[in-house]
Amino acid sequence: MRSLLAVALTTVVVATIGTAVPARASYGSTVTVIANEMHTTECLDRVWVFFCDPVELFGVAVITQDNGQQIRCEMSLPAAPGADITTPNQICSGRTVTGSFRVNFELWEDDSFEGGSREQADLNPGTAKDWATTNLLGGRNGTSTWSTSGGPSSAVFTVSVTARPTSISITSPSPTSAPREFDPRLGEALTISGSLSVPSALRFTITNQATAAGFTLYEAPFYGGIFNVTWDGRWSDGSFAPVGAYTITVVDPVDGGTAKTTQARVIQRVGLAFTNMTSQPASNWQYRSGPITVSAVATAGGTFRMVVRKGATEVFRTGDQRRAAGPVGFTWNGRQADGTFATPGSYTFVLQGTADDGRAFPDGQRVTTVVDPPAGLEVYALAEPGVPAVNPQAVPGTSIRAKVVAANHTARPAARITVEMSPAGWIGRPAVFQPRVVRTCVQTNECQAVIPADILAGEAVAYRVTASEAEGVPDMLTSTADWRITDLNPPDPSQSPEVTLVPLWRASVPAVVTNDRINNRPLNQTLDVAYAPGTGYDTSTLDGARQFGNEVDDNAWQLLGVRGSIFPSSIAAHWSQVGIWVQNVPVQVTVSPDSVAVCDWPSSFGPVSFAEANGILHTVNCRDNAWGNTFTAKDPRIGWHEFHHDAYHLGDEYCCDGGNSFGDGINTYRSLQDCQRQGSDPSTCNEIADSTGSTGWWRSDAPMSDVMIDNTVERPDDLRAAEDAYAKCGRAQC
């Protein structure tokens, strides 16, 4: 690290380097930036067309840390007049920096006090106007001076780095208590934990107190305030550490004065036993979703096997396996010795073993249940956060989350979930289809795949998820969702007007692949819902954008019926025909002044023209409602209800606020005769009424748990309306 610092400072510094000071920390620093000189020949303060006023120059420094966070500093204003400033001016003073960093220097002319605007001077021969240092190593005392070159303007600036030494505290094992004892041969481990005052690199060493032999367990930078490192009790060559006392040292590798120590003792317990016996899953194993793994810790080496019994009958036995002392484990895919698969019930998993010295291990037993999974296998996926493009840029860690459910939409594990991704283009712009598998998860009901950096830096991501049961099971089920597209980054303003005129982003829309190119499905083939940020979601801030993205996510999962309230959904059944959009236009939601206190929105709000439903998400305490093709929702379950008003033209099926007429002839009827003639089931027609009175309207769906009553399940009339809507989409009439 010291040699790298020397190379960095001697090969790129144009002017002088300060006197070297011994390094006193690995990563924490304070940074000061001074503008020594500023010069320009540019006309930065033009008056009319031909004249240039005298300039007032000031410097700006942007410090970019290796974790991507930035610190921006400006010289104090007003700036001194003149095109050649040779008096040093401080820009940043003692700014706290973690890790390595670089400094981008900018030169500006300040005309703001004269009613003009700021103009940036050009320090660079390329397209950029600023001048960047190379990477500087944090935690190393030193001063470097930089001179720009190649542009019509120039500057000389100095970067001073002062290390911040760290203070280390070990909390476990306690340095003041008796040495912690553990037996690695039984799978026991030692956790070394504590805190440090500022970010630093840490080196963890283990030393045998009897022989003074030692090795480095771990060395890495720690950017947070705590550390937790585990020693499994093995030596550097993988063998178990000899029984005895050990010293654990934690130190900043470049500052020996920070060293702290504690002690531990490696022991070896006596006797033969299987300890810590577990199974994965622990109970309610569904063999269709992958094998069960039974594991334990053996106190001595030997030969081991697993026997599976149902009641008193042995149904499966593994072959013998030789294992050293420590963890042992076996798997079973559910296929019994006679070739049939396990049936539901209670099973006993028995571990047996014979030690190398001939002694028999006492049997280890674990009882668990085998169950059949609920019927059906479906898989859905959305981006997290829900609307990456609402942020200034898609942040690292943005991912695609897949969820696997049964036909009743309760979660169920799959043996394998595969997430594929491909770059995609902006709205209406096909991109070359380049699919690749990004992540595969096993024996789980969820799989989260982080979007790779090369795709994340682009315009949009296309993704497809597949879930399957275990290979070889009878009537193996597989479910593959269609390709969908989510926008990642807002278009550059230089792009054509059709993609920048309205801030409209695809949160999740169906995609089609044609001639090796991928694009969203035509809008007349999809039923679309567009969400807008109402009062309570300020998408101009990073936190507000994330909160709104999460709310869009929650509403989309609720439309699918797989998070929040769990039930089958017509949207899920037709997911390949449903598009989720975001119109990033803030909408003020207010409370109506009358006693009804409904949610109002401005008449100037323009819903997305092609969207069948436009949802305004908000946090205002008012009564949500739908009008035309627009609705408000402060909760995803309410959004589920209001969506049915807009998308399927359904009316309320409860008494008595006037929303019944919206579904005239679809799910609400003007008379008993109309209900019996037009409803899904004439035998269940009932009048919409309550203890306060009746409405004169009738409904065919009998249960009171209904999406148009209490925001729950869709009933036959509701599903019939949904099928009509998607049939229109199938005819390209959406």
Image: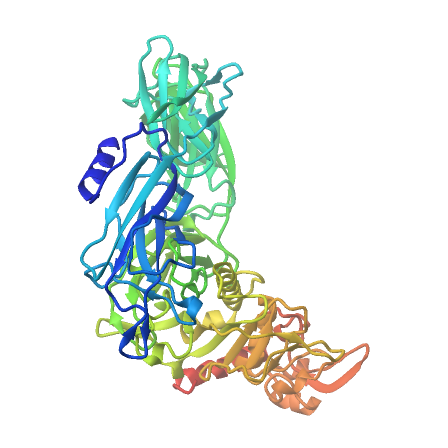
Residue at point 18% right, 58% down? 150
How far from the left and from the top, in percent, is residue 42?
Answer: 25, 66
Left or right: residue 149 versus residue 708 is left
Residue at point 45% right, 73% down? 581
How did the renderer colour the structure? rainbow
Count of all numbered marks drawn on residues in the image: 0
Viewer-nearest residue: 80 or 370: 80
Viewer-nearest residue: 722 or 67: 67
Report whether residue 476 is seen.
no
Q: Is residue 396 above or below residue 708?
A: above
Q: In which quarter of the image is the N terminus?
A: top left
How far from the left and from the top, in percent, is residue 73?
Answer: 40, 52
Q: Is residue 322 above or below residue 380?
A: above
Residue at point 49% right, 22% down? 173
Residue at far right of view: 692
How far from the left and from the top, in percent, is residue 236?
Answer: 29, 22
Q: Is residue 594 above or below residue 236?
A: below
Picture quarter containing residue 629? bottom right
Report whether residue 629 is seen.
yes
How far from the left and from the top, in percent, is residue 142?
Answer: 30, 36
Left or right: residue 509 versus residue 547 is left
Q: Quadrant of the C terminus?
A: bottom left
